[in-house]
Image (cartoon, rainbow, N blue to C red):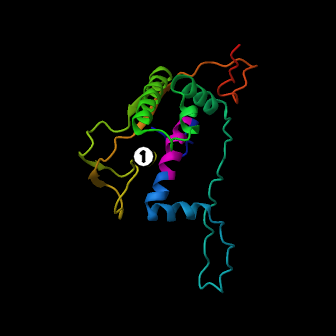
Amino acid sequence: MSTPTSHPSFWRRIPLAFGAFFSTLSDGAYAARVEKLHLPEAAPVAPVAPAAPVAPAPAAAPVIVKEATPDAALQLLALLQREARLIDFTQENLAGHADADIGAAARVVHEGCAKVLRDYFTIEAVRQEAEGSRVTLPAGFDPASVRLTGNVVGAAPFTGTLSHRGWRAAGVRLPKLSEQHDAAILAPAEVEL
């Protein structure tokens, strides 16, 4: 479980990014909160002769931004291409193909993606309860592990219905890369002789 002062790992940020993207599209209130994060802070306004001395607010801790190297993401993308032909599938124009052909291709992509996840990751559910169960989140619950949706008002404890158990990467076993490996080459071009 992460502490409030820790920063999520690169692998934890991937599902957060996708979740934030789709939540921003589907939930106006969530989008408004995200938009506030990106607004520049307003310049402080000098108070007009305060009646009593005002103690200065404690300085906020500086946000430390850690630049992620793209090598691990590129390596994962290369593995998904090698095992599932994911890039080939997403780059193909499917408009001229029959649904049955697309379904057959999707089965190959699904099986290959599942193989990559099994071989290189240990993935477990964030919550152990069955989806549809009623759960209570106590005060101090980890908001990185559980996202509240619907009519969110007040303070914890919150009681609601578990609509998705969530996923956590409990282990990552990506192959080691040599110094000379160019991670940007996701799949080499093939020339048949």
The residue carrying mark 1 is 142
> Residue drawn 36% across and 52% down?
139
Q: Is residue 13 magenta?
A: yes
Quadrant the N terminus occupies: top left
Q: Is 113 placed left or right of 125 in the picture?
A: right
> Residue drawn 62% across and 58% down?
60
> Residue drawn 53% across and 21% down?
173
> Residue drawn 69% across and 73% down?
43
Q: Tell me the SS state at disc 1.
A: loop
Q: Nearer the viewer, residue 72 or 193?
A: 193
Mark 1 crowdedness (10 Å alpha carbons): few <14, some 14-19, many ≥20: some
Q: How many marks?
A: 1
Does the magenta stretch mainly form a helix, a strand or a loop?
helix
The span picked out in magenta is 11-21
Name the kind of residue labelled 1 in the image. Asp
Q: Is 70 placed left or right of 91 in the picture?
A: right
Q: Position of residue 137 (x, y in %)?
A: 32, 49
Q: Position of residue 110 (x, y in %)?
A: 43, 30
Quadrant the C terminus occupies: top right
Image height of 158 relative to 40, above or below: above
Q: Nearer the viewer, residue 80 or 108?
A: 108
